[in-house]
């Protein structure tokens, strides 16, 4: 066992958790201690070294007290039920009253406890996902979103996770479980953000989504923490018959950031729509691993990821689609396009298509390019400066995906922030677009 | 307005322009005609400063300044406009945003204040109507999914918004049907005000029925081999370019 594995188990012992989560915690601790620590030879971690985690070994739980995040973190202006967590600790003052069906694990009633026990840790494969095992070992607080048969959640659930600098390196564990009964509908926004570029935290996050027959979920996952923060997280989804998952994810890089998406088509006619954007700069890293399991016939997946990698940053994208022998009539598409804006930027992209059925339609592709010279010239020939032209083109590259985001408030939140990310002094970029 | 003397230029180590001279005064419309491969498009690209198009000798004065010494964007801000033969599609960058950035850059250069978004959108909508382009095109990506004619009308709209002193139309008529050609020509003619100059580069005489030039030049082998008035265009239409081949030194 590595030092960090040992340390993580000690941290688990310091936690207070409800007794009804004990079984899961024990199971998690067992898998976590039995797992061998990833090295460069471990395929799933080949391009993403965990050394920052091993070296900095955060040794305590994050605290919310005394953190003055409101001055530096702007929440998204949404008509939604908001829950705020600061360094993993629930912040009641800045959270809304919860509607029926949305509850923290700590306040779950008996029926909800049963529901949580039934699903928590069951969507994710903790043998394959090391940090899911850790999340199970650390299971304590979390958010349950439960929507009953034929119901629609009146407002989106907006979970704002803020990281602030701790006195000493600290950890946070974020857990979300969404259970949609048949024919129900919900929208969930997970927003991770840091109050400061200088961070010393490690966030381990895990979201599990169970989508019942003909149910539909719109899910957002924004990872906007910066620079020094360490984050390993995953979104794991089970789709039953005719269920639909529409996902949008956007991440800035940081010292270590790894997000996994795993979607399992378990019922016929299920549909996945997943758009992703990653934008590492400076010396940041972002690693997206997506894995889609087509287990049954007649399901569709449409996955589009785009990244802009600048400075000396590195991005890793691994998109796997696995079509099982019985999954006939599958339609699956995966596209990954990358823009490198600096000679020192790096992208490691690997689309993986594994097809064991013979009557399917699948396509995948990955491209790596620089800004198009002709487009650049066209903009300049109209008087736009080269710097502004580069900004506009970079922004345009991902704007195509932003335009598809159904929640206007999220588009409005991201556009100006991304514009400043791409170019200093180009405030107007993105302001005038598409009204 | 524009004074080109003995201009030589190369593209990818290939000499295309070989001593081209032309003098355009304010308010004049000059047509440049010539066979394929004669250097027509190269001229427009060299004048607008396209990377890879290198002037090797000769001089170009634009409003008395050394044009070749300016960056692409400076030339545009000084009042030179090239309507592209093949306008570029840029998905993700909205036409409106692009146009405002261009107009703002020029106004800034002229020490004018930037237009507010509301003012600009009003102006852009009015201008789009002048070239019969539905204002919904302003919201789309630059030229994204536009037909050939829509792209050319978008070029003319940009020209109207930027109010350049010298407009270079690079085969703006190619690929257009008569109706679209009429719209484009009307747009150009509306901008003829006795001060603004035009360099109309075309392969076909047809355009010159609609945009009547003061002078017609024949470009062949990288040089102007014959100049005349608008009747020269008709002569070319009747005889083709073959009879001029002998004039290429």
Image (cartoon, coloured by chain):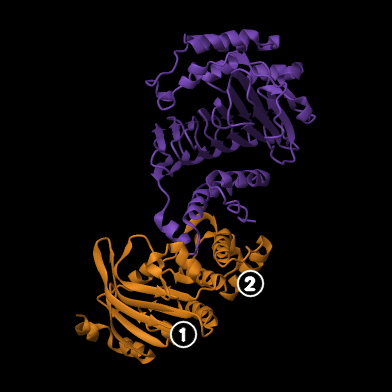
Chain colours: A purple, B orange
Find residue A23 and report its image quarter.
top right
Within 10 Å of the Cα at label 1, are there few (<14), some (14-19), or many (20+) other Cα atoms? Answer: some
* Placement of A37 over or under A161, stated as above or below: above
* Placement of B121 over or under A348, stated as above or below: below
Find residue B37 and report its image quarter.
bottom left
Report the Cα–Cα distance between label 2 and label 1.
23 Å
Mark with earlier residue (2, 1)? 2
Callout count: 2
Q: Is residue A89 left or right of residue A97?
A: left
Q: Residue at x 58, y 53 (%)?
A: A429
* Residue at numbered disc 2: B126
Q: Chain of mark 2?
A: B
The answer to whether marks 2 and 1 mark residues whose Cβ atoms lie closer than 8 Å is no
* Placement of A228 over or under A185, stated as above or below: above
- Residue at far right of view: A97
Within 10 Å of the Cα at label 2, are there few (<14), some (14-19), or many (20+) other Cα atoms? Answer: some
The x and y percentages for residue A246 are: 59, 39
Looking at the rendering, in which quadrant would you find the C terminus of chain A? bottom right
Q: Residue at x 59, y 60 (%)?
A: B139
The x and y percentages for residue A17 are: 69, 12
Q: Residue at x 48, y 20 (%)?
A: A128
* Residue at numbered disc 1: B210
Q: Is residue A74 left or right of residue B29?
A: right
The x and y percentages for residue A224 are: 59, 35
Q: Secondary structure at mark 2?
A: helix
Find residue B44 and report its image quarter.
bottom left
The x and y percentages for residue B140 are: 56, 59
- Residue at far bottom of view: B231
* Placement of A62 over or under B101, stated as above or below: above
Q: Secondary structure at mark 1?
A: helix
Q: Chain of mark 1?
A: B
Q: Is residue A94 left or right of residue A56?
A: right
């Amino acid at each position: 066992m590595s030092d960090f594995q040992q340390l993580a188990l000690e941290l688990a012992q310091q936690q207070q958790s409800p007794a009804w989560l004990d079984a899961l915690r024990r199971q998690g601790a067992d898998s976590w201690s039995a797992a061998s620590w990833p090295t460069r030879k471990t395929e799933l971690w080949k391009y993403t070294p965990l050394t920052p985690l091993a070296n900095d070994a955060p040794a305590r739980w994050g605290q919310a007290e005394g953190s003055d995040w409101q001055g530096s973190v702007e929440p998204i202006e949404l008509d939604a039920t908001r829950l705020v967590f600061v360094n993993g600790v629930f912040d009641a003052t800045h959270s809304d009253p919860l509607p029926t069906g949305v509850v923290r694990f700590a306040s779950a009633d008996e029926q909800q406890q049963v529901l949580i026990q039934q699903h928590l840790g069951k969507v994710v494969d903790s043998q394959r996902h090391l940090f899911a095992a850790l999340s199970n070992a650390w299971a304590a607080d979390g958010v349950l979103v439960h929507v009953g048969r034929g119901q629609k959640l009146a407002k989106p659930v907006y979970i704002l996770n803020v990281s602030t600098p701790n006195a000493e390196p600290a950890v946070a564990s974020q857990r979300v479980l969404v259970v949609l009964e048949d024919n129900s509908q919900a929208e969930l926004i997970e927003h991770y953000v840091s109050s400061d570029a200088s961070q010393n935290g490690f966030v381990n996050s895990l979201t599990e989504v169970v989508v019942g027959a003909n149910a539909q979920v719109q899910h957002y996952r924004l990872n906007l923490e910066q620079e020094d923060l360490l984050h390993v997280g995953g979104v794991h989804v089970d789709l039953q018959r005719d269920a639909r998952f529409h996902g949008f994810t956007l991440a800035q890089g940081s010292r270590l950031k790894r997000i996994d998406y795993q979607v399992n088509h378990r019922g016929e006619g299920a549909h996945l729509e997943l758009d992703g954007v990653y934008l590492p700069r400076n010396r940041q890293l972002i690693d997206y691993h997506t894995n889609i399991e087509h287990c049954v016939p007649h399901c569709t997946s449409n996955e589009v990821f785009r990244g802009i990698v600048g400075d000396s940053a590195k991005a890793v994208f691994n998109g796997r689609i696995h079509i099982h022998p019985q999954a006939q009539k599958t339609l699956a598409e995966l596209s990954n396009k990358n823009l490198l804006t600096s000679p020192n930027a790096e992208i490691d992209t690997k689309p993986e298509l594994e097809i064991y059925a013979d009557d399917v339609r699948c396509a995948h592709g990955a491209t790596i390019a620089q800004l198009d010279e002709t487009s650049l010239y066209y903009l300049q020939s109209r008087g736009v400066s080269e710097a502004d032209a580069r900004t506009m083109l970079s922004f345009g590259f991902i704007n195509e995906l932003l335009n598809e985001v159904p929640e206007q408030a999220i588009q409005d939140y991201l556009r100006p922030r991304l514009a400043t990310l791409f170019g200093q002094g180009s405030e107007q970029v993105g302001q005038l677009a598409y009204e | 307005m524009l004074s080109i003397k003995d201009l030589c230029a190369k593209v990818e180590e290939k000499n295309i322009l070989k001593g081209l001279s032309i003098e355009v005064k304010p308010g004049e419309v000059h047509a440049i005609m010539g066979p394929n491969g004669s250097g027509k498009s190269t001229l427009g690209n060299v004048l607008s400063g396209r990377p890879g198009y290198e002037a090797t000798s000769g001089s170009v004065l634009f409003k008395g300044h050394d044009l070749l010494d300016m960056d692409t964007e400076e030339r545009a801000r000084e009042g030179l406009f090239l309507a592209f033969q093949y306008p570029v599609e840029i998905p993700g960058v909205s036409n409106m945003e692009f146009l405002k950035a261009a107009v703002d850059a020029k106004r800034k250069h002229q020490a004018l204040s930037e237009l507010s978004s509301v003012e600009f959108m009003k102006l852009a909508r009015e201008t789009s109507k002048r070239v019969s382009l539905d204002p919904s095109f302003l919201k789309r990506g630059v030229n994204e999914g536009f037909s050939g004619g829509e792209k050319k009308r978008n070029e003319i709209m940009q020209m109207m918004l930027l109010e350049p002193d010298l407009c270079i139309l690079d085969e703006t008529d190619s690929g257009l049907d008569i109706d679209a050609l009429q719209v484009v020509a009307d747009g150009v003619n509306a901008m003829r005000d006795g001060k603004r100059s035009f360099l109309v580069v075309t392969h076909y005489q047809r355009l010159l029925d609609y945009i009547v030039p003061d002078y017609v030049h024949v470009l062949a082998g990288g040089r102007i081999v014959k100049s005349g008035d608008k009747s020269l265009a008709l002569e070319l239409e009747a005889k083709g370019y073959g009879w001029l081949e002998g004039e290429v030194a």
